[in-house]
Image: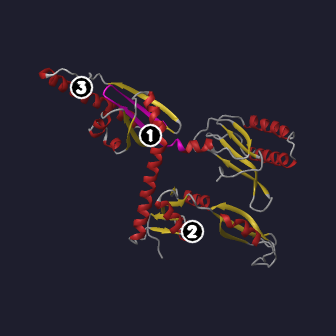
Amino acid sequence: MLADKEGRGTELISLYIPPGKQISEVMNMLREEYGTAANIKSTTTRKNVQDAIVKVQQRLKLFKETPENGLVIFCGAVPQNGAGSEKIETYVIIPPEPINIYLYRCDSRFHTEHLQELLREKEAYGILLIDATAATLAVLQGRRLEIVREVTSGVPGKTRAGGQSARRFERLREMRLQEYFRRVGEHANEVFLPIENLKGIIIGGPGPTKYDFEKGDYLNYQLKEKIIDTIDTAYVDEQGVKEVVDKAPEIMRKIRYIEERQIMQQFLYEIGHDTGLATYGEEAVRKALEAGAVKTLLLSEGLDIARVKVKCSACGYEEQQTVRGPMLTSFEQSLVGKPCPKCSAPSLSIADKQELIEDFAQLAEYTNTEVEVISDETEEGQMLKNSFGGIAAILRFKLQE
């Protein structure tokens, strides 16, 4: 949601403060930036940037020191749906893990990529490259790639000699190969088993050796279950690891599609067999979330709906409405001159709005519910969006009617 917001010109501030950074230092920097902003030629941009800096300073005053994981603040004048109107929006985020970047940026968008990287890095992938001469073990975590072990085989090359000696040589070579496979398997168990967030293992190599290794019982059964793809690479060294990394996005996308299909198939099973352990639609899912009954919340990536709070400025009357994104402007215009249901004064306006995905994600957080955002690039994802309104849930227990 933050990544999609755009400002007019360079009016949106992104501020990343790493752990240990003194708040007083950051406040001094912001005072200097306020002075620098006075040189901006455009009156509107100058006012918006300086107003945003003041808002950031006000939020920083609430912190005596930087939290242990650091602090991220996004603030700026974001155009609203009403023609020509802007509103200063401020978001304060304490990251889930320590951030190691100090950044102040004024731009036409919020720089969320450093936070997004933290979320991506929770998933790790093991890479095992093998042929008859050597093996390499590496771990890919987000953008970080670490080559952990390199193993040489000690297996002699194939002989061309014929007769008895050739057969004996082949038997000895096969024994050496089996022993080498066992060593690689032991190294793999040592490297990959302790990784708690290991999503999968990719095996690669230039010839058939990788398939022989994969078919044998050289890996711990837990790791064998995590093999997600076996691919051809020209090398088994660092260059081969880079080949796998180049192909990894496509492999990982394929895995995510498989996961999404499995989640959707479970939901469709519960619906189709009328088990009472699934529900869909905004109202039904909200009710289930509030009851703490939702095990997995399914939200369509293409869900363009906002939860809007309408308020009367005359009597304070409030109501909640759900409005589709494309209809937001016309809905706002329809409130002009409309009488308040309570006091009849034509004083209704939108006081607050929140993306429905964000609204449901917050509800899910309170009840320790898993949230799955399903892409609409698969058949199942399209079904969630078009047939079930983009909102569905797999339940922990049946709800009483």
**Residue at the spot of label 3:** 176
Look at the numbered disc 3 and give the secondary structure of its residue. Answer: helix
Answer whether residue 136 is magenta in the image.
Answer: yes
Residue at point 47% right, 32% down?
A: 242
* Residue occupying image coordinates x 62% and y 43%: 113
Image side of residue 72 versus residue 242, left or right: right
- Residue 193, horizontal then vertical, whole percent: 38, 38
Q: Which residue is mark 2?
A: 282
Residue 205 painted magenta:
no
Q: Is residue 52 visible?
A: yes
In the displayed structure, does residue 151 sit left or right of residue 83?
left
Mark 1 or mark 2: whose residue is earlier in sequence: 1
Q: Amino acid at mark 3?
A: Arg
User: Pointer 1: what residue?
Assistant: 125
- For marks 1 and 3, the one nearer the N-term is 1
User: How far apart are labels 1 and 2 at the CA level?
Assistant: 36 Å
- Estimate how packed mark 2 is, as few (under 14), some (14 to 19) or many (20 or more) residues with alpha carbons within 10 Å: some
Span colored in magenta: 120-140
Q: Disc 1 versus disc 3: distance between alpha carbons? A: 29 Å
Query: Between marks 3 and 2, how big is the CA–CA gap?
Result: 62 Å
Q: Residue at x 44, y 36 (%)?
A: 244
